[in-house]
Amino acid sequence: MNEPIVAHHWLTYAAPKAAPALATSTVLALARIWNANGAEHSTGNAVLMGALALGAAAAGASAINGRHGSPELAATGFGAAGALALAAVAGYADGLALPLLLWAIATILAYVLLARLWRTDRRERVAFERHMGERRAEHAHVERVEALRADAQTEVARSGAAYAEQLAAALITRATLPGYDPKALHTAGLPQLPTTTHEEYTV
């Protein structure tokens, strides 16, 4: 069976690529709003966010070095650490230069960490599509072989039926010929079908 071809919208491909930049931009914007509402030069808030960032980074490192390491969990941990560090600095600083610098660094690191996951997903998707293509080709070959076999059997059955019809017509025609005498054929030594067969086709 032919599978329907689904045309994906361009946003389907663009959204995952834009997600890291949107995430870091959102953190920067929220941190600057927090800065304008009392977080500027607040040591307590900066220490809290820094501690959370260190905890997230430690979680990401343990996800890489653990017995059951998971690249997805590591990327999540490091991404959270970068976002918290960016929020701490952007909320504490009184200018935009340092927050924008950290925003650029965080965005680049996010893309670096996610690039490996995207390559892995792409390889798995290509391997899956190749495997499914091979399976479809194999099934199509089996279907073609079975179709040829069915056609051959149909032709054999049709040939047998045609031969039987021709034989019956020949027997009937021979029986209606003037001067036809089965006993004379037998006396002359010519081949003759059994009487039962002749009777079956003349009835």
Image (cartoon, rainbow, N blue to C red):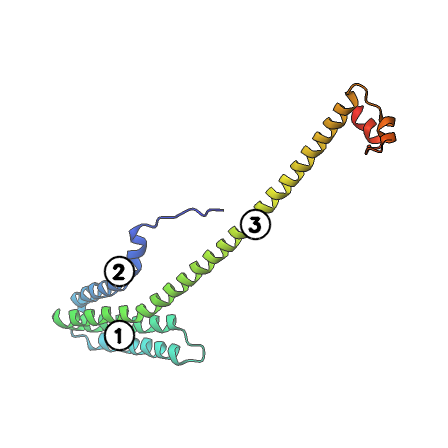
Q: Is residue 113 left or right of residue 125?
A: left
Q: Is residue 126 left or right of residue 95?
A: right
Label 3 or label 1, whichever comes before in sequence order: 1
Q: Position of residue 169 (x, y in %)?
A: 72, 26
Q: Quadrant of residue 121?
A: bottom left
Tell me the tag on residue 49.
1
Of residues 81 and 199, the one nearer the viewer is 199
Q: Position of residue 183 (x, y in %)?
A: 87, 27
Check disc 1: other Cα within 10 Å, few if <14, some if 14-19, many if 20+: many
Q: Contact, CB < 8 Å: mark 3 with mark 1?
A: no
Type of residue at label 3? Val
Which element carries disc 3, helix, strand or loop? Answer: helix
Check disc 3: other Cα within 10 Å, few if <14, some if 14-19, many if 20+: few
Type of residue at label 2? Ala
Check disc 2: other Cα within 10 Å, few if <14, some if 14-19, many if 20+: few
In what quadrant of the picture does the C terminus appear? top right
Residue under the point 78% across and 27% down: 201
**Mark 3 against mark 1, which lies toward the viewer?**
3
Tell me the tag on residue 99.
none
Q: Position of residue 148 (x, y in %)?
A: 57, 46
Q: Contact, CB < 8 Å: mark 1 with mark 2?
A: no
Tell me the tag on residue 18.
2
Instruction: Classify 120 as above or below 54.
Output: above
Instruction: Please state the total of marks drawn on the protein image.
Output: 3
* Residue position marked by numbered label 3 in the rendering: 145
Label 3 or label 2, whichever comes before in sequence order: 2
